[in-house]
């Protein structure tokens, strides 16, 4: 079973170590665990381009300081949705609610970051994201991989509630790039992907959704 809200709050408080007030980038300020309404708590998180989750005000963001408990990550990311709370929507565009607890999230690129390709038995391959293993995974759709020339990153469909597009972590993207085929005279972007003996044209259908989500 997933941990209750109190367990999420306890994990966050353990990370705080008594440091409560902070300012993110000068445009917004908050206090971790603040209670703007009776019996309501608010916490603030950040996910990097490797899919690692941190408290937003962590001064050091690396593998040592990120959240690693699988059940916490499953609970957090399975409840992720666009922030329509009326609070911090511009700075923290995603929200993971847990009862009366609001967990706000901002991201370096996308809130969903695919980290592993799961190949189990004879079943269809799946992409796992943000440390959740099989519990946080979507069917792998190689033809819908989107390489973006603007930043050199690779994207793949993600759950709709989390924005519909996820980033592929750089190490996994490098492995998948070996399957790309480039057309003559177009070395910048691939046109096809070779997967399990099939040659598939890249649909590029995620491009409008991804670009629409980016600030002007």
Image: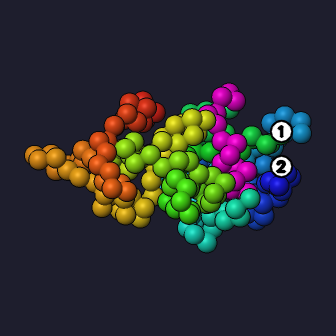
14 vs 49, left or right, is right
Q: Are marks 2 and 1 in contact (CB under 8 Å)?
A: yes
What range of the chain is rendered magenta? 72-86
| Image quarter of the N terminus | bottom right
- Outermost residue on the bottom side: it is 64
> Dot 2 corresponds to which residue?
5
Q: Is residue 55 visible?
A: no
Residue 46 within the magenta-colored segment of the rendering = no
Residue at 70% across, 30% down? 85
Residue at 31% across, 42% down? 202
- Outermost residue on the left side: it is 185
Q: CA distance from mark 2 to mark 1?
A: 8 Å
Q: Percent position (x, y) of residue 71?
A: 74, 59
Q: Quadrant of residue 3?
A: bottom right
> Dot 1 corresponds to which residue?
100
Tell me the number on the disc at residue 112: none
The correct choice, above or below, for 171 with respect to 210 in the image is below
Q: Percent position (x, y) of residue 192?
A: 27, 47
Q: Percent position (x, y) of residue 201?
A: 29, 42
Q: Is residue 181 visible?
A: yes
Label 2 Cα neighbours within 10 Å, binned few <14 / some 14-19 / many ≥20: some
180 vs 108, left or right, is left
Q: Percent position (x, y) of residue 24?
A: 58, 48
Residue at 62% across, 64% down? 66
């Amino acid at each position: 079973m997933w941990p209750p809200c109190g367990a999420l709050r306890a994990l966050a408080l353990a990370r705080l170590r008594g440091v409560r007030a902070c300012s993110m980038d000068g445009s917004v300020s908050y206090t971790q665990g603040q209670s703007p309404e009776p019996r309501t708590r608010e916490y603030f998180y950040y996910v990097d381009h490797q899919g690692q989750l941190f408290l937003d005000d962590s001064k050091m963001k690396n593998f040592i300081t990120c959240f690693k408990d699988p059940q916490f990550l499953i609970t957090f990311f399975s409840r992720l949705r666009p922030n329509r709370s009326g609070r911090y929507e511009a700075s923290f565009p995603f929200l993971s609610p847990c009862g009366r607890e609001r967990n706000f999230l901002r991201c370096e690129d996308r809130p969903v970051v695919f980290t592993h390709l799961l190949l189990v038995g004879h079943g269809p391959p799946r992409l796992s994201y943000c440390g959740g293993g099989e519990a946080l995974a979507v069917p792998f759709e190689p033809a819908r991989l989107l390489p973006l020339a603007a930043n050199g990153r690779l994207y793949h469909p993600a759950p709709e509630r989390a924005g519909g597009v996820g980033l592929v972590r750089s190490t996994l993207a490098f492995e998948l790039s070996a399957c790309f085929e480039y057309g003559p005279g177009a070395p910048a972007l691939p046109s096809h992907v070779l997967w399990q003996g099939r040659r598939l044209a890249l649909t590029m259908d995620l491009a409008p959704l991804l670009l629409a989500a980016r600030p002007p």
